[in-house]
């Protein structure tokens, strides 16, 4: 019987996993604020340059589930190391890119690495500790996941302003090096457990094709318009792919995603809330930096500093949410998080957008809500799952978050573009209304989303379920 790793090795492992998650989430948001500088440096149009963001998102959304399944078969630790190497190589290629084509190649390689890192890091970090210790571990993992995405614009603004846009990618390389050193110390790469299973090629192809088409359609919707038949055709292909995927997974001996996951109401509820929280969070993160720089004429650094309180709040309340879940129970915690997101959208709709303090406060309240949800959402998805179900839960949640990000970018950018196009004159006041008006529309929807908290158990029932492991 294999001896349990020492506490020191488990702590080192958790730190390595947090670094892996931070790399992935930082890269999802760090580029937004640097796009004007990249456009000038590479000499390409913004429409083309946006594909440096899009290709990363498409690959992560498409490849996460198949690659996380390979981690079960060939070893989570080994795949995590491979993911780090891919991500580091992709960051180096993108950071040193002399032109647009090389930049895209680097983002493709980084996307493949990220597809491994996010689900495998969560699964490795959680499974290294007993069920009783999960709350603290998931607090750290969730805090890192939400916080790294939150600080992306701030880091991007500072790095671009003080160095150059190249460093938004090159900054990843030393982080990868530290994560690799910790991984080789903490992981038992030779003796790690693996499962005896075949690769579900048919399920992989169906899921990847469906996710690719849906993600591509959502990204292009900002150019085509949400009412365009091509968008709905892509979504229709996605629905067909889901049906085919379920049929395939029910009849193969080694399914890529164990459909038993969706028998657990708490997992399904966690996935839904993760999608919604990511959607509304990205909706602010993708619009406000552009509003501050393009409409109000602020510098990238100044725009980043306005959002800094939100970033710090995500860190603080992400940790609080993960630690408080056993004290307050999932239902109350999710309700508080969703209510804070609603309050932030109300503030964005009514405060004076010229006031730095008012806008920073509205974003800060969003950070509270998103942090409270992002911190515990992974442990809510994991519940008391073990083994393959645990890995599957983390890969599905990772994909759900990516879909939420894609939806957030596509819908909010499309709505803002439509508002701007409809303006008779593009005065600063009219442009401000076009940008801020998109948040007012979502207030009734967010009010209805508060009901989702009822899908989660109260404190007593949650603690009782947590004491029973599911394999």
Image (cartoon, helix red, strand yellow):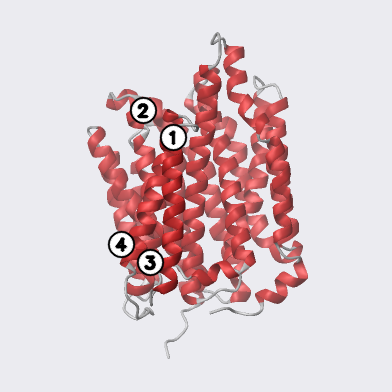
Q: Mark 3 points at which residue?
A: 183
What label does residue 229 carry, if any?
1
Inter-mark Cα distance, 3 to 1? 48 Å
First in sequence, mark 2 or 4: give its number: 2
Whether residue 312 is situated above or below residue 41 in the rendered picture: below
Q: Mark 4 points at which residue?
A: 82
At x 57% / y 12%, what residue is drawn?
A: 428
Which marked residue is nearer to the observer: mark 1 or mark 2? 1
The answer to whether residue 273 of the structure is visible from this angle is: yes
Whether residue 106 is situated above or below residue 246 in the rendered picture: above
Inter-mark Cα distance, 2 to 4? 32 Å
Which marked residue is nearer to the observer: mark 2 or mark 4? 2
Inter-mark Cα distance, 3 to 2? 39 Å
Q: Name the residue under label 2.
A: 47
First in sequence, mark 1 or 4: give its number: 4
Q: Quadrant of the N terminus?
A: bottom left
């Amino acid at each position: 019987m294999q001896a349990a790793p020492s506490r020191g090795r488990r702590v080192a492992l958790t730190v390595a996993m947090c670094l892996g998650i931070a790399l992935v989430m930082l890269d999802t948001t760090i580029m937004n604020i640097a796009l004007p500088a990249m456009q000038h440096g590479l000499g390409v149009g913004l429409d083309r340059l946006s594909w440096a963001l899009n290709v990363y998102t498409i690959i992560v959304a498409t490849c996460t589930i198949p690659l996380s399944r390979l981690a079960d078969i060939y070893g989570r630790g080994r795949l995590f190391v491979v993911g780090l190497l891919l991500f580091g190589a992709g960051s180096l290629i993108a950071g040193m890119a002399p032109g647009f084509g090389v930049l895209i190649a680097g983002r493709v390689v980084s996307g493949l690495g990220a597809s491994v890192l996010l689900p495998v890091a969560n699964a490795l970090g959680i499974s290294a500790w007993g069920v009783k210790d999960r709350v603290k571990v998931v607090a750290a993992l969730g805090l890192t996941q939400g916080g790294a995405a939150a600080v992306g614009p701030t880091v991007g603004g500072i790095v671009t302003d003080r160095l150059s846009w190249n460093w938004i990618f090159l900054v990843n390389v030393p982080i990868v090096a530290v994560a690799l050193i910790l991984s080789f110390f903490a992981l038992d790469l030779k003796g790690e457990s693996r499962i005896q299973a075949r690769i579900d090629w048919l399920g992989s192809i169906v899921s990847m094709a469906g996710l690719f088409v849906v993600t591509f359609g959502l990204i292009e919707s900002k150019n085509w318009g949400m009412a365009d038949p091509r968008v709905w055709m892509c979504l229709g292909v996605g629905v067909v792919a889901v049906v085919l995927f379920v049929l395939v997974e029910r009849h193969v001996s080694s399914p890529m995603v164990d459909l038993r996951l969706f028998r657990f109401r708490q997992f399904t509820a966690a996935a839904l809330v993760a999608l919604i929280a990511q959607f509304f969070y990205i909706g602010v993160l993708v619009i406000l930096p552009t509003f501050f720089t393009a409409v109000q004429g602020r510098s990238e650094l100044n725009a980043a500093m306005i959002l800094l309180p939100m970033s710090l709040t995500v860190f603080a309340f992400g940790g609080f949410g993960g630690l408080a879940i056993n004290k307050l129970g999932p239902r109350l915690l999710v309700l508080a998080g969703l209510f804070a997101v609603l309050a932030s959208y109300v503030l964005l709709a009514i405060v004076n957008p010229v006031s730095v303090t008012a806008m920073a406060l509205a974003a800060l309240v969003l950070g509270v809500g998103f942090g409270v949800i992002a911190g515990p959402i992974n442990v809510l998805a994991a519940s008391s799952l073990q083994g393959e179900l645990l890995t599957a839960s983390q890969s599905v949640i990772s994909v759900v978050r990516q879909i939420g990000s894609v939806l957030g970018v596509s819908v909010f950018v499309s709505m803002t573009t439509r508002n701007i196009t409809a303006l008779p004159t593009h005065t600063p006041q009219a442009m401000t209304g076009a940008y801020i008006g998109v948040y007012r529309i979502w207030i009734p929807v967010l009010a209805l989303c508060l009901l989702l908290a009822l899908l989660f158990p109260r404190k007593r029932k949650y603690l009782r379920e947590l004491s029973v492991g599911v394999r």
